[in-house]
Amino acid sequence: MTQRRSEHNRFGVALQLGCVRFLGTLLIDLCQVPTNAQWFVAIVARQLNITNIDILSDYSQRETTRREHTALIRNQYGYREFVWPWSFRLSRLLSSRSWISNERPSLLYDLATGWLVQHKILLPGASTLTRLISQIRERAESRLWQQLSSLPNLEQQARLDPYYKFLKQPEHHTSTAFVRGRSMSAALHLMRPLNVTKHFKPME
C-alpha cells in the first residue's frame, strides 16, 4: 500500500482492502460508499494522514488502475473468485442444510455470504446467490416428495388418492401442502395416518 505513488491511490487501495475484508467484495466506485459507512472512510483517511477525502474521486478516473489494484489485493491477501471448487463446496453445504432443516432463503443467504467471507471468496452478485439457493431448495423439495411417494404400498396409495384429488382442485392450490418452505411438515402430516413415515430417514 505504501508503494503507491499518489495519495488517492493509497487511499483507494486501503478502502478496497477494508471492503473486501468486511464486506467480502470489491467496490466498483468508492465514491458511492453509503452514508452510514462514511465513518470508515474517515478512519482510513486519518490513518493515512489524508486531510482531503475528496481526492478519492481521482481514484475512479482510471479503470486500469482499479483493475491492477484489484489483482494486487487478490494475489497479496489470497482472495479467490467464486468458481470451482468453491462454488461446488458451497452448493454441498447449502444442499445439506436444505435437506435436514426448513430454513428460510434469507437464512441460507446469510449462511452463504458468511461462509464465502470466511474462506476469502469474493462474493458473487446477489442474484447469483439467490438463484443458487432457489435451485438447491427446489431440488431438496423434489427429492423429499420422491422419497415420500415411494413409501406407500398399493393399498396406502389408494387411501391417499382422495387427498391428492382434493389438493389438485384449484381452490386448494394454496394449501400449506404446496407452499414452499412448509413442504416437509405438510408431507409428513399427510403420510402420518398411513403409518409409513417411520421409514423416512432425514439423512442418508
Image: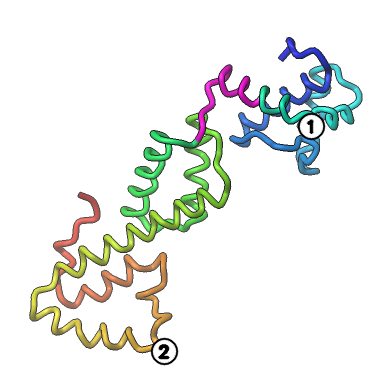
| Type of secondary structure dominating the magenta stretch | helix
Of residues 20 and 5, the one nearer the viewer is 5
Give percent across and percent down for residue 37: 76, 39
> What residue appears at the point 51 percent right and 33 percent down from the top-left corner?
81
Counting from the top left corner in percent of width and height, residue 24 is at 59, 35
**In the rendering, at what x and y percent does residue 102 appear?**
38, 58
User: What residue sits 31% from the left and 53% below the top?
Assistant: 100
Q: Is residue 72 magenta?
A: yes
Q: Amino acid at mark 2?
A: Glu
Query: Where is mark 1, residue-wise?
Result: 60
In-image side of 192 versus 19 (left or right):
left
Q: Which residue is mark 2?
A: 171
Which stretch is magenta? 70-81
Q: Is residue 72 above or below residue 89?
A: above
Assign the N terminus to one quadrant of the image: top right
Does residue 146 lie above or below 29 as drawn? below
The answer to which image quadrant residue 64 occupies is top right
